[in-house]
Amino acid sequence: MEIKTVAPDVELTGATLIVGVMTDREPAPGSGEVMAGVDSAFLDVAKFEGKPGQVLALPHEHAAALLLAGVGDEASFDSVRSAVGNAIRAVKTTRAVTTLNQVPIEGATRAVVEGAMLGGYEYREYKTNGEAGAVVTVELVDAEETEIRDAVIGAEVTNLARDWVNTPALDLAPATLAARIAAAAEDAAVSCQVWDPEQIREAALGALLGVAAGSERSPSLVVLEYQPAEPKGHLGLVGKGITFDSGGLSIKTAPFMEEMKDDMSGAAAVAAATIGIARLGLPIRVTAVMPLTDNAVGGNATRPGDVLRPMTGPTIEVLNTDAEGRLVLADGLGVVRRYQPDLIVDVATLTGAARVALGDAIAAVFGSNSEVAARVLAAASRAGEHFWELPLFKEYRKQLDSDIADIKNISASRYGGAIAAAVFLAEYAGDGPWAHLDIAGPARARETTGEQVKGASGFGVRTLIELAKGMAESV
Ligand code: BES
Ligand code: MN
Ligand code: ZN
């Protein structure tokens, strides 16, 4: 999909004109005249009121079609992005033209670009037949080129993460994902190291190796580095990269295993965000570490009761092999700490408990202090992603006491599982500023609506990019 700016007198022949309509059929600011020519009888028949999610195609004097997109009660970044997402999928021509970027709100151009590119996303890799979406070009009337370019980068890297996560585990072994990340990094001039099993053993990443032990496919660890000329800060990222989570010997039941190709969403998010930050040329150094492995059930699999030795930090008694994310993150955090970043952020589809607590639309954020969590929340709100802070409640640490090792990987309590996992990770995150993002809920979109397309969401990518922007501005 190509996005460009055009003059107000652009030729509409063959194009679909997308306009925004507010609740009660009020024209969205910037699209007033178009509505004046619309016969309200058409709107009555279609019960079109301008509510969020409503889209109505009508004939137009000059264009191939006029598409009314319901924005709802308030024009905001979210409502405009969502309206464009819904509209883009209803376009039957290869060209779409819109003035929705002229709605007088902060980031209107970006909302339109994200709505079109994220809402128009399709994963067609394994579809033999069937039609692809029609739209090839989206033309924004009188938009800033630089705003378009930056928004396109954010949307492209989000869709890159979606592609990786949507890929079936069969075709995405740890080494394959590492190679795909390396190829994307190379295009963006981000340096990339891929550690093979030998290097992982030399570095003594015993927790990652323990998770990998049950799989025939060997683990990889990817380190991406983006080094701008005059960095204003250094962001360290760690992403959970479980290429398939069967649960290991503590095997999952079939319904819970269905979606576990998603379990590398954290790794995909940090890789895509690093590439986005580099392509945007933000003055923040980024070091991103992605431990990649299956969690499988082979004859050599780690058993409940086994003890693992991560690179640094407490030895771990594994009582449930399905709590594997925190194990690979322990080693990922150990590796990123060697680079001494100013702030460490890890991203992981870590616990079903986070999803139980916050649902499918909201991720949990934990901060080593409230200022760190506030920075993530501010970045998320600029990105239009939903997070909620949960407490890093240190009193729960004793529920992780092990009889024979320094810590165990599951809590003695059945409750508060997302917090227990965060308290576990705190043991490996060091003493500096650190945030933990548990994206188990929103990593996957369960329906197609607005800028969301059923399947991998690319959640977290744009929040991490905004976080880097925030770091650049705060110094
Ligand atoms: N990958 C899962 C968490 C998950 C669940 C992600 C649902 C997305 C959707 C993780 O490795 C896991 O299995 N966690 C266990 C931890 C438990 C054994 C302490 C869980 O949440 O049940
Ligand atoms: Mn698991
Ligand atoms: Zn997992």
Image (tube, grey):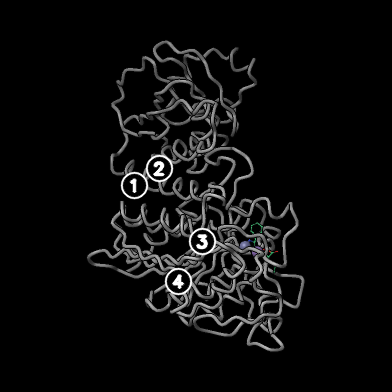
Q: Kindly identify the amino acid type of the residue bearing the numbered disc 4.
A: Ile
From the image, state whether disc 3 or disc 4 is nearer to you: 4
Quarter of the image where the N terminus is located: top left
From the image, state whether disc 1 or disc 2 is nearer to you: 1
Q: Position of residue 93 (x, y in %)?
A: 44, 20
* Residue closest to the far top: 61
Q: Is mark 3 within 8 Å of ligand 1?
A: no
Q: For the residue labelled by badge 3, is the local secondary structure a helix, a strand or a loop?
A: helix
Q: Which mark is residue 150?
A: 1
Asked whether 148 or 240 is in front, the reply is 240
**Mark earlier in primary sequence (2, 3):** 2
Q: Position of residue 56 (x, y in %)?
A: 56, 22
**Mark earlier in primary sequence (2, 4):** 2
Q: Which mark is residue 377?
A: 3
Q: Is residue 75 visible?
A: no
Q: Quadrant of ligand 3?
A: bottom right
Q: Which mark is residue 290?
A: none
**Mark earlier in primary sequence (1, 3):** 1
Left or right relative to 465: residue 245: right
Q: CB of mark 3 within 8 Å of CB of mark 4? A: no
Instruction: Quickly name the residue at label 2.
Output: 110
Quarter of the image where the C terminus is located: bottom left
Q: Which mark is residue 344?
A: 4
Q: Position of residue 382 (x, y in %)?
A: 45, 53
Q: Is residue 83 above or below residue 320?
A: above
Q: Disc 3 and disc 4: Cα gap in Å?
A: 15 Å
Q: Kindly identify the amino acid type of the residue bearing the numbered disc 1.
A: Asp
Q: For the residue labelled by badge 2, is the local secondary structure a helix, a strand or a loop?
A: helix
Q: Disc 2 and disc 3: Cα gap in Å?
A: 19 Å
Q: CB of mark 1 within 8 Å of CB of mark 2? A: yes
Callout count: 4
Q: Is mark 2 within 8 Å of ligand 1?
A: no
